[in-house]
Amino acid sequence: MKRPLLLVLVVTSLAAGCGGGGDDEPSAKQAYLVKAEAVCAKVNTEIDKAKKQRPTSADAVPPYVKRLIDLARTNVQELSALTAPPDDAADLKAKVLDPLTEQLKIGDAYSAKVDAAAKAKDPILLQLITNPPTETKADLTFMKAYGFKACVTAADTGAASK
């Protein structure tokens, strides 16, 4: 019984090693994805924690919004700091990083409006709270096809409103 199992393990090991050029190093894309997904998974966890502590007063809304935007900013900064695979760098910049940076600008503008409304005790605060910007700028189709999972969740601002 042990011989067939050993044979299967040996054949499986040999098959797994074939086609990779003889080294066990992941491709640049795989290495990038592992790092990027770790960044996004960490941020998704922090966002989930923050959302469990939703504000219960008007004064608590601006720091809450700022916290969510700061988490998104950290995500974009850490993703931007990663070395993208040379063959994919232009697409990642154009379809992921630049659009996420644009989303941050929209988030910062929204945060400023929320802050001003809260300071002025302006009733528009309720409208701002119930209508946050939700347009996703990143190309989620590209991201999914590239292999992103946690980063799709992090980038999909439309999902935040659901």
Image (cartoon, rainbow, N blue to C red):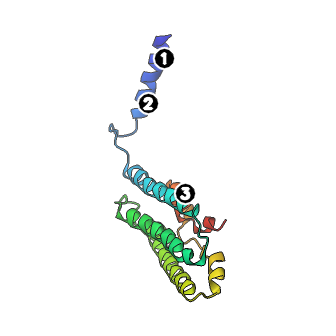
Residue nearer the viewer, 109 or 65: 65
> Does 29 appear above or below 4?
below
Amino acid type at mark 2: Ala
Q: Quadrant of the C terminus?
A: bottom right
Q: CA distance from mark 3 to mark 1?
A: 37 Å
| Image: 114 above or below 46 | below
> What is the spatial separation of the Cα atoms under label 1 and label 2, in whole angstroms?
15 Å
Q: Position of residue 36 (x, y in %)?
A: 43, 56
Find the residue positioned furthest to the top: 1
Is residue 142 depicted above or below 11 in this figure?
A: below
Marks 3 and 2 sit apart, C-alpha to C-alpha, by 28 Å
Amino acid type, residue under disc 1 in the picture: Leu
Q: Position of residue 106 (x, y in %)?
A: 52, 79
**Lower sequence index among marks 1 and 2:** 1
Q: Where is mark 3, residue-wise?
A: 144
Q: Which labelled disc corresponds to residue 15?
A: 2
Residue 60 lies, in percent from the top left, at 55, 74
Can the viewer see residue 91? Answer: no
Residue receiving disc 1: 5
